[in-house]
Structures are given as C-alpha cells and as structure tokens.
Image (spheres, grey):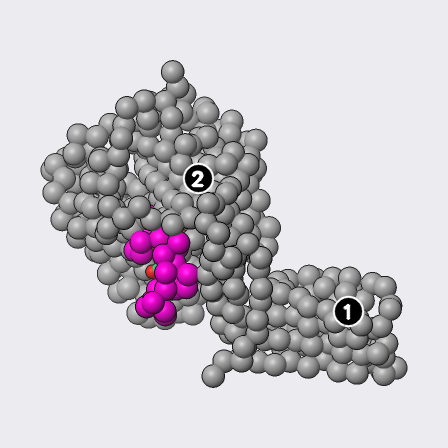
Amino acid sequence: MEPIWNVHKFGGTSVASAERYRKVADILTSQPREGQRLAAVVSAMSKVTDELIALAEGAVTRDESYPARFNALKHRHLDTIAELSLSETARLDLTAIIEGDCKDLSDILRGVWIAKSYSERVLDLISGYGEVWSAQLLCALLRSKGEDATWLDARQVLVVEPTGRTVAVDWEVSRVKIAAWLAKESASLVVVTGFVASTHDGVATTLKRNGSDYSASIFGALLKAAAITIWTDVDGVYSADPRLVPDAVLSQELSYQEASELAYFGAKVVHPSTMAPAIADGIPIWIKNTFRPEISGTRISRTTSSNQPVKGFATIENMALVNVEGTGMIGVPGVAFRLFGALREVDVSVVMISQASSEHSICFAVPEKQAELVKRTVEEAFFAEIHRGQVQSVSVAMSCCILAVVGAVVFWQWSARA
Ligand code: ADP
Ligand code: ASP
Ligand code: MG
C-alpha cells in the first residue's frame, strides 16, 4: 500500500535557534509513522527574510554597513549549526554549503551595489536563501537523530507564475515534477523549503511574504496529504490576535471560508492563500503551537460542528477610505467597471467596496500609502464627469482601519484610528 503523507509546517519563530530546531525535530520524530511519510515545510529562521531583503536594500542604496550585517547573518547560521551537536562530518559539510551560498550571495549583492538596482527576480533569489539554509539545518539535525531524512529545494518541483501581488501555481507541471522527484527519493521524512518556487523558465521566485503557509498547503495538495499541520507560536486561531487582545478565545474548529476571511482581514496566524489548495481534496489544516504541542489547536476543514455565529475579529490597519460621489452616476451602467478598471491599470488592490443602492456614491478601501495615487487615477478616469459636474467629489479619509467580524456570515465595519 502507498504510504500516506502528512505535511507539517514550521514558521520562523519555530526555527529561531538551535534549541528551537531541536524542539521541531522532537515533534517530527514523535509523529505516528507506520505506513506514513512526513513532509516538513520550513520557513527561514526568524527575521532572516527581513534581513536578506534589508541587505539588498543596503546594497542598492550603497549603505556601507551592509557587509557587516551580511557577516552577522552568516554567523548566525554558522553558530546555530555549531550548536546543533551534529557529527564532525555533517557539521563541516553544512558549514561548507552555507559558506558557498554566502559567497554566491555576496557576489549577487556586489552586482546590486554596482548596478544600483535589482529586478524583482533578483530580490526573490536573495530573499529565498533563508529557507534553503533552514531546510538543510533541520535535515542535518534529523539525520543526526537517526531519521531517514532528505531535503527538497521546492524550486526543483514547484512551478508558479508571479501575477502581480500573488502567484499562480502550475499544478500540472508541479505534479509531474514532484512525481519524478519522488520516484528517485524514498526517505520517509522530507524537509521542504517553504516560500520558494521557480517560474516556468526555471528562474527562482517566491510565494511572497509569509508564503510558507501557502507552500505547506500546496505540498499538501501535491502529495494528497491526509492533513496539513501549521506549527506556530500560539495555540491556534483565536477570536482576535492574542497579542493585541489577551482575552481572545481559541477556536477549536473553523471552516475553510471562516479561516480564509480571518486571514484575509489580517489574522497573521495563517496566510490567506493557504486554504485554497486544501479545499479541493478536503484536507484538514491544523494550527498548533510548537511550544505546547499537547494542546489540540484549531482544526480548519469543510464543516464545523460549532454553532457560534461569530468566530473572530481581525483588523487591517493603515487604510484609506475613498468615496466617489455624484448625481451623474445614478443609473449609469459601467461606472464601477471604469472605476475599478482604472485602479487595476495602476496595480491598486481594492480591499473592500460598498455602493449605495441609489448608485449615488461608491466607497472603497485601499492601502493608505496608495491613497494619493488612487485619488489622482480616479480624477483622471472621471475627468469629463467632474468637469461637467456629474461627479461632485472624490474624497479620501486617511488613517482608517478595517475591523472584520468573521463567522458564518461576514460583517464589516469601518473605524477611524484613534
Ligand atoms: P510563524 O512564524 O509561525 O509563521 P506568524 O508570526 O506569521 O508565525 O503568525 C503567528 C502570529 O499571528 C501570532 O504570534 C499572533 O500574534 C498573530 N495572530 C494574528 N491574529 C491571530 C489570531 N486571530 N489568532 C492567532 N494568532 C494571531
Ligand atoms: N520567510 C518568509 C517570510 O518571512 C516566508 C514565511 O516565513 O512564511 O516572508
Ligand atoms: Mg506566518
């Protein structure tokens, strides 16, 4: 019988130090294993992706301090390896790999320094090193504990096409590639790099910030896993961010839709795209705490037995509310089409829309930092109507926050930041 896959994902805080890698290894080795194979999708060590992006920024702006920061980042990894109590050979091998990658990375950053610019693909290549190192650290530790473990650089099998703000997975190609990889690899535990992927041309790319949760569910779907467990630093999904609301209540169960809405409206505990790949095959997603594995956590699946109408609150801060008002819009077809079409052209993602039934006004939310661009774009798109007095105003309210109340039904409310 074919073994059943279970996918586990460990976020940056779960792999922040040698001590934490050991905790992760303990969780993996204590999973039920009969007839099962495990995939462990890992993030970079805590803050490493931020630091890699800062190095690219440092190089492009010719900040003299970037080589020192680069050195600190390299040594953070080398020190962690030294603390993992690996065999001498394993330690030397891993150290040589990190040194080699750092030499390449230093050349890339030097190129950025000289060119005073970098492309998005170059930034993707730079920012993905953290996951590549993290996966190899965990794999070496698991092997040192006698595990039959190997690691997979997701860029070998996961093919995506970046589409602006997100990425489109090429499921067909990725399935063929992973099947070919698995045909040659029989290890019962595979450590997979989160976050990174390749384009169709074989160029390194990423699933965008916080994308390792998404990696986990993509691999869950590719491997037809029985379950996906996202290990993080809280006991599960709470009714609100427990860091902001200490009285928040832990949800035992959520539907895919509820979890997606909470994530979309800012619950950082799980990336909003995570649920989509799991939905087709009904794979349950568990959110659990690396530091308290005995707590059962939150189960996200198709249905929930909970009859609580409200599952949680989430907020998105730093938003602007734009209101386009005009008597000339009443009953005129295609106004919304033109408005949002114009915003699409300048790559603005509209978070929320409301239109008065009279069609007298359209109100929508955009990130505050795009508010000026939005106002200018709308005024240009409706230049003639403004000139003729059919659109009376395009007003922008800054410093807003979206508070989403998520449950079987989703409600939204606006609030101005204090
Ligand atoms: P990881 O490094 O494991 O990916 P993240 O920092 O991305 O972890 O996500 C975990 C954090 O999400 C928690 O520490 C918590 O502060 C935050 N969070 C925001 N909203 C919620 C929520 N509704 N429930 C649980 N955690 C939440
Ligand atoms: N390391 C990546 C980031 O910080 C991906 C992730 O951890 O989810 O964005
Ligand atoms: Mg995360």
* Residue type of the residue flagged with mark 2: Pro
Residue 245 in magenta? yes
Q: Say the numbered circle drawn on residue 178.
A: none
Asked if disc 2 is less than 8 Å from ligand 1, the answer is no
Residues in magenta?
231-251
Residue at image coords 25%, 46%:
293
Visible residue check, residue 52: no
Residue at image coords 69%, 77%:
323
Q: Which residue is mark 1?
A: 357
Task: Please tell me whether residue 89 is drawn above or below residue 370 in the rendered image.
Answer: above
Q: Main secondary structure of the magenta part?
A: loop
Query: Horizontal and vertical percent for residue 194?
Result: 39, 45
- Disc 1: CA contacts within 10 A as few (<14), some (14-19) or many (>=20): few
Residue nearest the observer in this picture, 388 or 258: 258
Occupied quadrant, residue 7 = top left
Q: Say the numbered circle drawn on residue 284.
A: 2
Spatial CA span between label 1 and label 2: 39 Å
